[in-house]
Image: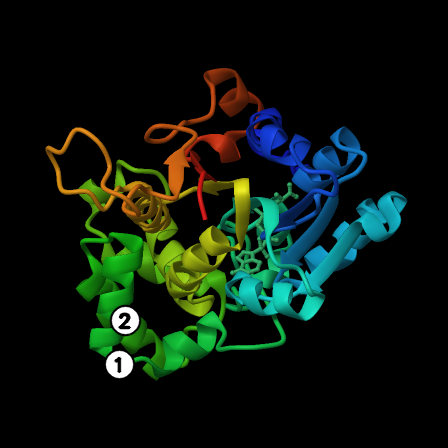
Amino acid sequence: MQLHIPVALNRCVALLAPAIEKSNSPIVIDATLGMGGHTKALLAAFPSLRVIGFDRDKQAIAIASENLKEFGDRITIVHAVYDEISLTLENLGIQAVDGILFDLGVSSLQLDEADRGFAYSQDAPLDMRMDQSSGLSAHEILMSYSRSDLIHIIRMYGEEKFAPRIADNIIKAREAGALNTTKDLAEIVKESIPAPARRTGGNPAKRTFQALRIEVNQELEVLTRAMPQAISALAIGGRLVVMAYQSLEDKIVKKAFTEVTTSGTPLGLPVDLPNSAASYTFVIRGSESASDAEIIENPRATSMRLRAIERVAA
Ligand SMILES: C[S@@+](CC[C@H](N)C(=O)[O-])C[C@H]1O[C@@H](n2cnc3c(N)ncnc32)[C@H](O)[C@@H]1O
């Protein structure tokens, strides 16, 4: 089993440090707790810090609880989807937080556990739910969606140009009772992609598996709902740090950050009009990637895009 190495760990700690250090009783939200790698480093680095950790995966929560037990009540773990940030803070009686971290996507734990069905390289039931206690599994989606809905998700979320052929072959296989496992799906995708197109771009199943995972977990809708909640939960001086691993997610983050860092003053005026200056500013202009050295050590960091903003006014 591949060990989960937290991505851009030192960089995330450094980005959140000024926001944590300015507060007497700092609070950070780790919206994607996973196995608690980033949270552990933060709690160790800042002795007065309290972390609220979210994960929708009960297995991740069990592991994080074990990994973080030395920190006692400095860590509050919540089994929830991260679009419940506002509700959770209200329930906990917290007005604002000093930092928020999102490390999006699946963890290596989820990819390595064959029976979760995330990996095209291992044969398993087609599940792909991060929270196995709710929602439709990948198999239920593959068995019930119309041809046009299958094409839509494979094309949009997988950026797969052979989506119609894949959808046709999914329908043929499901009618024949031959679509049950990740291996069945990987074979269907392979057969749907013409041989010349298969020679480049890695495993042809990768894009369709990504598309299904996004649909199963409603990843883009949830992220779109979560961004404004995270942005408004920040105290003045608070920072929001997001790591995205695929372009559709990164676009949502970029759009949300651009909106709140843009002044309401019409272009061309030399100073901001009263009450129209942006309340947030970029900590990183554009985005950062992992260094070559980190990518060699941790291939998961290859596609990572890191963005960060700070709240500067109410
Ligand atoms: C990349 S891992 C995080 C790894 C973590 N930073 C660490 O160092 O251990 C992403 C985690 O976020 C969780 N997750 C993904 N989307 C979520 C959502 N919408 N709400 C809550 N948790 C989510 C996944 O279940 C997974 O455990």
Q: Residue 174 appears at what percent x and percent y?
A: 36, 79
Q: Nearer the viewer, residue 65 or 153?
A: 65
Q: Is residue 44 left or right of residue 237?
A: right
* Residue at the image position 38 percent from the left and 36 percent from the top: 281
Q: In the image, which disc is placed on residue 146?
A: 1
Q: Nearer the viewer, residue 135 or 257?
A: 257
Label 2–label 1 contact, CB within 8 A: yes
Q: Is residue 85 above or below residue 241?
A: below
What residue occupies the far front of the structure in this picture? 274
* Residue at the image position 38 percent from the left and 49 percent from the top: 206
Q: Nearer the viewer, residue 133 or 253?
A: 253
Q: CA distance from mark 2 to mark 1?
A: 6 Å
The quadrant in which the N terminus is found is top right
Q: Is residue 306 above or below residue 192?
A: above
State the count of labels: 2
Q: In the image, which disc is placed on residue 150?
A: 2
Q: Quadrant of residue 80?
A: bottom right
Q: Is residue 302 above or below residue 129?
A: above
